[in-house]
Image: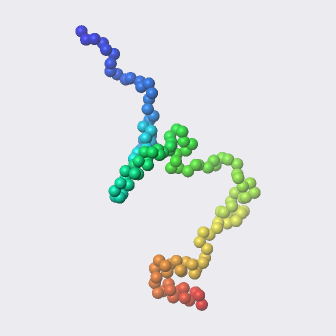
Amino acid sequence: MAKKRGRGGYRKPSQPAAVSGPGALSQRTDGKQPEVRIPDMPYGQQTQLLAQQAAAPLGDSGGANAPFPMDQPARPNVFAPTERPQEPISQGAAFGPGTGPVDQLEDETDIILAALYSVNPHPVIAELINTRSV
């Protein structure tokens, strides 16, 4: 008859490791930063780069301790009270009270023609520039 040893089956770890998210949400759980190797570096500089990375480890770059993921900007609170109480809600829109939309590119024909000519120095564009200045 075999001795019952009590082995096998699930064993709950005393200090479970953190679990990473799937795909783009995945993060390292071992607490180490990966070594970045740059291809085609001059002789000896790759070793110096790896030594610098080991000497200055990165801090916490996300996870449960970060206020928000580092690759995403902080989201505005759309339910917060307005920071501009004197400004109409339709400010910048093409309707309602307030000033209308602001044109990002002013109608400066000379500037537009000069930019066009710098990209494509065609004689017709040069002629347009010369006739505009008269």
Outermost residue on the top side: it is 1
Q: Position of residue 122 (x, y in %)?
A: 46, 84
Q: Give the vertical position of 111 relative to 94 (above or below).
A: below
Residue 102 in sight here: yes
State the image quarter where residue 133 is shown. Answer: bottom right
Front residue of 38/87: it is 38
Looking at the rendered structure, the number of numbered marks drawn on it comes to 0
Measured from the top left, where is residue 118 in percent x and y?
A: 49, 79
| 58, 14: nearer the viewer | 58
* Image vertical order of residue 28 relative to residue 40, above or below: above
Q: Is residue 130 left or right of residue 5?
A: right
Q: Nearer the viewer, residue 88 or 115?
A: 115
Write the residue at 31% across / 14% down. Answer: 5
Point out residue 106 in the picture as x, y percentages from the top left corner: 61, 74
Q: Is residue 133 left or right of residue 86?
A: left
Quadrant (top left/top right/bottom left/bottom right) for the C terminus: bottom right
- Residue at the (41%, 51%) spot, across then down: 49
Residue 75 in picture, x, y percent from top left: 59, 49
Is residue 47 shown left or right of residue 93? left
Q: Is residue 20 something one can see in this rendering?
A: no
| Residue sitting at x 75%, y 57% | 86
User: Which residue of the protein is positioned furthest toward the left in this rendering?
Assistant: 1
